């Protein structure tokens, strides 16, 4: 009797500018390996520097895409190409910190028509949809309230979580208000009501967080959203 062919490993693209000194970059492989072990999945992942992303063709064949922290990116356009490809082609997508910020800008420009949407860290002109935080979240931990029955709440199995950050920029208030009638939904807030998680409800799995949930792996804890990403990639 012939044996069944072995299933191909899931292929995950990690898009960002790898730096071994960045805590989140140390955590991401650990988080993926832990999630793969828990779910009994065979997973390969490739670090793709933003300068390597010239067109959507560079992303074909991946089962999921994660735009990782540590921006400004050397090639900001590479990050936007990646996010747009995942959004338009229903590829499971996760963005953390810089990935979250650039997902906001990509949506503002390409879906809402805010062609001048910009990031206050890197731009001097335009509509700053990503603006300086009133209080820095560099190496801070905070409580986040999650909207029930969302992808993020289902992943964590609860509606209040505590996670770590390393950022100085977040969603501008006027843009948060403009999202009210959009399919890009705010699904997590901090205690002050500021945006911390977004999900695109017209997409099978599109989640971005300002916090760096992958850091849980550095202390031997599971990262629920990484497990959710791998499960989405499998289907």
Image: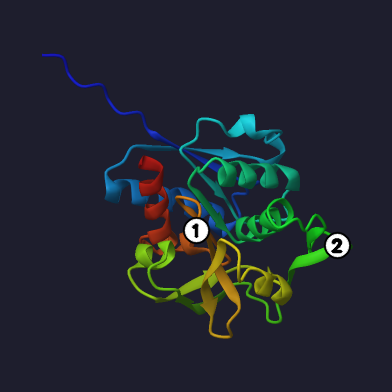
What element does badge 2 sit on? loop
Q: Residues within 10 Å of mark 2 (few under 14, many from 20)?
A: few
- Reading the image, the residue beneath label 1 is 201
How many numbered marks, from 0 up?
2
In the orientation shown, which residue stands out farthest toward the top? Answer: 1
Q: Position of residue 90 (x, y in %)?
A: 51, 43
Residue at 37 percent across and 62 percent down: it is: 155
Look at the picture and state if 104 lies above or below 86: below
Specify the color scheme.
Answer: rainbow
Nearest the eye: 188 or 48 = 188
Q: Nearer the viewer, mark 1 or mark 2?
A: 1
Q: Is 10 situated left or right of 69 in this image?
A: left
Look at the picture and state if 111 lies above or below 2: below
Residue at 17 percent across and 19 percent down: it is: 3
In the orientation shown, which residue stands out farthest toward the left? Answer: 1
Between disc 1 and disc 2, whose residue precedes? 2
In the orientation shown, which residue stands out farthest toward the front? Answer: 181
Q: Position of residue 34 (x, y in %)?
A: 35, 51
Q: Position of residue 58 (x, y in %)?
A: 62, 31
Quarter of the image with the C terminus is: top left
Residue at 35 percent across and 73 percent down: it is: 158
What element does badge 1 sit on? loop
Determine which of the numbered discs, if any, sits on residue 126 in the image: 2
Using the numbered discs, state the Cα–Cα distance from disc 1 to disc 2 in whole angstroms.
Answer: 27 Å
Q: Is 59 situated left or right of 120 in this image?
A: left
In the orientation shown, which residue stands out farthest toward the bottom? Answer: 192
Residue at 48 percent across and 72 percent down: it is: 163
Q: Is residue 192 visible?
A: yes
Quarter of the image with the N terminus is: top left
Q: Can you tell which quarter of the image residue 78 is in? A: top right
Q: Is residue 75 visible?
A: no
């Amino acid at each position: 009797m012939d044996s069944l062919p072995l299933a191909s490993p899931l292929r995950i693209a990690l898009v960002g500018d790898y730096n071994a000194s960045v805590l989140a970059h140390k955590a991401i492989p650990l988080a993926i390996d832990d999630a793969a072990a828990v779910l009994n999945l065979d997973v390969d992942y490739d670090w793709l520097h933003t300068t390597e992303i010239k067109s959507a063709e560079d992303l074909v064949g991946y089962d999921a895409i994660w735009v990782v922290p540590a921006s400004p990116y050397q090639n900001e356009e590479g990050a936007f190409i990646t996010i747009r490809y995942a959004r338009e082609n229903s590829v499971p997508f996760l963005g953390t910190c810089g990935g979250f910020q650039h997902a906001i800008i990509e949506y503002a420009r390409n879906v809402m028509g805010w062609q001048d949407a910009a990031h206050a860290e890197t731009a001097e002109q335009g509509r700053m949809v990503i603006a300086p935080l009133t209080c820095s979240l560099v190496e801070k931990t905070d409580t986040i309230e999650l909207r029930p029955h969302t992808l993020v709440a289902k992943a964590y199995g609860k509606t209040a979580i505590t996670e770590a950050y390393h950022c100085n920029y977040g969603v501008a208030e006027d843009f948060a208000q403009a999202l009210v009638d959009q399919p890009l939904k705010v699904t997590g807030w901090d205690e002050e009501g500021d945006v911390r998680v977004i999900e695109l409800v017209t997409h099978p799995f599109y989640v971005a967080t300002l916090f760096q949930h992958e850091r849980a792996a550095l202390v031997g804890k599971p990262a629920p959203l990484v497990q959710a990403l791998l499960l989405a990639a499998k289907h």
